[in-house]
Image: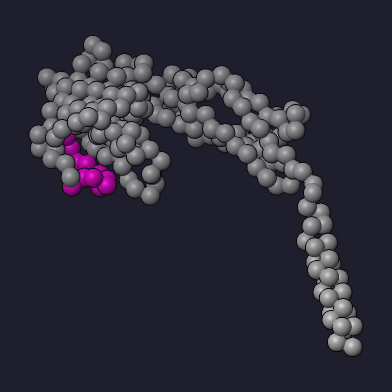
């Protein structure tokens, strides 16, 4: 009797287990394909201040088929102001899974101080180059640099840490009649209290547009991209 009861219990358990396996695996074998996006043209894409941004093109496929007609484009490009902007291309498959890709757009102001620059910076044994830095105009003689450190921390040493940490040392400055540079107020960035700004020295070369400066042990050269 005990043996028969044991067999009945085991059979019931196997039936329940088999039923559960059938329920949990049912419908899970279907394959879903993600959109694959690509960019045509340059990235970053360069536009001159005041001219129109013309979309250079993109590709989108889903399981080998062209689905570019289903791509959604969002953009914050403003060609009336020098700066670095972004265009985002997104696509969604039938199961609701999405994919996206970004293109940077540089709006340049040839000959202007408010422009996009390529930064080279070094401190001690650490050096970084080709870092994008934007200077915007605040008034006739005052400008704002998005990072006085020339990207040393935000793009060079600690890329990807923002927005958890603010490594952009936004700072006001003026270019004097003799082309020297004087600093104004600096924003509350992460390492602000670690630097001595009193020993800042900087110059602007109107012939080339190059800006050179240093403070403490950090040296920065900004070269306009146009």
Residue 127 vs residue 57: left or right? left
Where is 35 relative to 52, above or below? Answer: below
Q: Nearer the viewer, residue 171 or 9?
A: 9
Furthest-left residue in this view: 199
- Identity of the residue drawn at 46% across and 20% down: 46
Q: Name the spot of residue 141 as percent of width and height, x first.
A: 21, 28
Where is 206 relative to 181, above or below? Answer: above
- Identity of the residue drawn at 20% across and 27% down: 219
Quadrant containing the N terminus is bottom right
The quadrant in which residue 134 appears is top left
Quadrant containing the C terminus is top left
- Identity of the residue drawn at 25% across and 34% down: 149
Q: Name the spot of residue 26 as percent of width and height, x first.
A: 82, 57
Q: Name the spot of residue 94 as percent of width and height, x first.
A: 75, 44
Furthest-top residue in this view: 207
Q: Which residues are magenta?
A: 183-193
Residue 155 vs residue 125: left or right? right
Residue 154 vs residue 12: left or right? left
- Identity of the residue drawn at 23% across and 36% down: 172
Q: Name the spot of residue 2 as percent of width and height, x first.
A: 85, 87
> Could one spot residue 56 in this view of the protein?
yes
Q: Nearer the viewer, residue 48 or 41?
A: 41
The quadrant in which residue 84 appears is top left
Q: How is the image coloured?
A: one colour
> Could one spot residue 115 in this view of the protein?
no
């Amino acid at each position: 009797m005990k043996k028969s009861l044991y067999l009945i219990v085991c059979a019931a358990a196997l039936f329940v287990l088999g039923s559960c396996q059938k329920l949990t695996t049912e419908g899970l074998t279907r394959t879903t394909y993600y959109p694959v996006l690509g960019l045509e043209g340059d990235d970053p894409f360069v536009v001159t201040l005041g001219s129109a941004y013309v979309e250079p093109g993109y590709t989108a496929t889903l399981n080998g088929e062209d689905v570019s007609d289903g791509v959604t484009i969002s953009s914050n490009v403003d060609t009336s102001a020098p700066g670095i902007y972004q265009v985002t291309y997104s696509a969604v498959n039938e199961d609701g899974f999405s994919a996206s890709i970004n293109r940077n757009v540089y709006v340049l102001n040839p000959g202007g101080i408010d422009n996009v620059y390529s930064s080279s910076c070094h401190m001690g044994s650490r050096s970084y180059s080709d870092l994008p830095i934007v200077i915007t105009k605040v008034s006739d003689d005052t400008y704002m640099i998005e990072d006085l450190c020339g990207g040393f921390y935000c793009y060079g040493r600690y890329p990807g840490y923002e927005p958890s940490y603010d490594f952009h040392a936004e700072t006001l400055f003026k270019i004097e009649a003799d082309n020297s540079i004087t600093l104004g107020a600096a924003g509350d960035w992460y390492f602000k209290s670690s630097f001595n700004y009193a020993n800042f020295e900087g110059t602007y070369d109107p012939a080339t547009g190059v800006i050179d400066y240093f403070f403490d042990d950090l040296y920065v050269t900004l070269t306009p991209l146009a």
